[in-house]
Amino acid sequence: MRRRRRLAVVGIALAVSFGVGTLLMAFSRATEGPIAATLGRIGTLVGVLEKRLADRVRAPGRTAALAWLTPYRTDAAWLRDPDVVLLGAYDTGLPHSLEGVLQLESELGTTFPLMHFYAAWGDKPDQRFPLRELAAIRQLGSIPVLTWEPWLTDFENTLHPHLPLRSDRDRGGLAAIAAGAYDFYIDAWAAEAARFGTPILVRLAHEMNDSYRYPWGPHNNRPEEFIAAWERVVTRFRQRGATNVLWVWSPHLAYEYVEYYYPGDSLVDWVATGALNYGTVAQWADWYDFEAIFGEKYPQLARYGKPIMIAEFGSLAVGGDRGAWYRDALTDLPRRHTLVKGLMFFNVSTDQTVTLQTLDWSVTGDSLMTRTIREAIAPWAPPFTGQ
């Protein structure tokens, strides 16, 4: 009963958050520059409201459960060399609703130090610096992880006449970033990130070596263009004081030439990859255990000597024993792969990114699955102390 009351109040808070945010974004469609930025900062007040309402039904409170995380969420230097595995999740409702990720961590018996969501480049209101969402995550005591996707065709030519037409923009798009064509956008984000102040993990242009999924891949760009674009973005953030941003380089280990895309030790803080088992859901897929997906490729990432993040972690149920997959993957994980310092559950119930059918990666509500995961992480994950 107490859990249902807690989730109900959090749900009300999140509904208020989303409603006010939607009104702000609707109004900001007719605005640009300082007015839009001001609206974004006003929107962070919603995150504060959400935090206060949530805290009223948490005893001793979620932030108290994460008191041990204080050095990490206040000083980026701690995140560059963590001595624990930081768990987190991306949930279907993020970034507009935190309710799903709160439910997941409750069922898993832990409190997530990290919360992960995605943001695209572009001119739309929800493609500006996500100050409200970041502030809400911080207010709840966690550290934001942001996958930042350079969808260059989302910029309006009427606002940026110097850019190529949309139909011509993806080919050589990373070279254009490196040449400064998108500095107007990068600099705006950098200024807001510096103002935010506390650590953010940014996973920029992930899976850049995959020729099929994203326009910033090798079908449109050369590896050296990716590196030049990465350097441009990171350098401009640092020049504008956004040293609180830690940069996460995340190739796809199923594809070749990973090493050609590495920007260099001085420009990378973490390395990452996904570990998703699609089972037999499609003709191109098969059932692979965690060691086949990640463990065998672990040395490729470990060679860089950086903290490693499993940015998307999960298994479908088609083709094998899902419970055994999670148990085998998570049991003694920190001992087996010592450089893994972050793991993000992919708790998505409506995924249509690679298949026409909707895929369900979520474990929320599956008591057998959540109990299996809970038992596997219990020896090494901080305990959940909320009520």
Image (tube, rainbow, N blue to C red):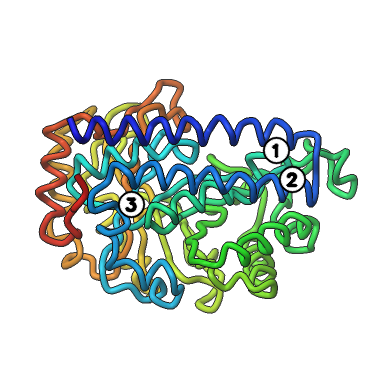
Q: Position of residue 266 (x, y in %)?
A: 54, 78
Tell me the mark number nearer the camera, choosing from 1 and 2: 2
Q: Position of residue 20 (x, y in %)?
A: 58, 33
Q: CA distance from mark 1 to mark 2?
A: 11 Å
Q: Which residue is labeled 2 in the image? A: 36
Mark nearer the viewer, 2 or 3: 2
Q: Is residue 192 above or below residue 353?
A: below
Residue annotated with mark 1 = 124
At x 68% / y 63%, what residue is drawn? 191
Residue with the most extreme front position:
56
Amino acid carrying label 3: it is Gly
* Residue at 60%, 44% in the rendered image: 43
Q: Quadrant of the C terminus?
A: top left
Q: Quadrant of the N terminus?
A: top left
Q: Within 10 angstroms of label 1, few (less than 14), some, or many (20 or more) residues?
A: some
* Res 147 seen here: yes
Which residue lies at the image location 65% right of the left edge and 60% below the top edge?
A: 192
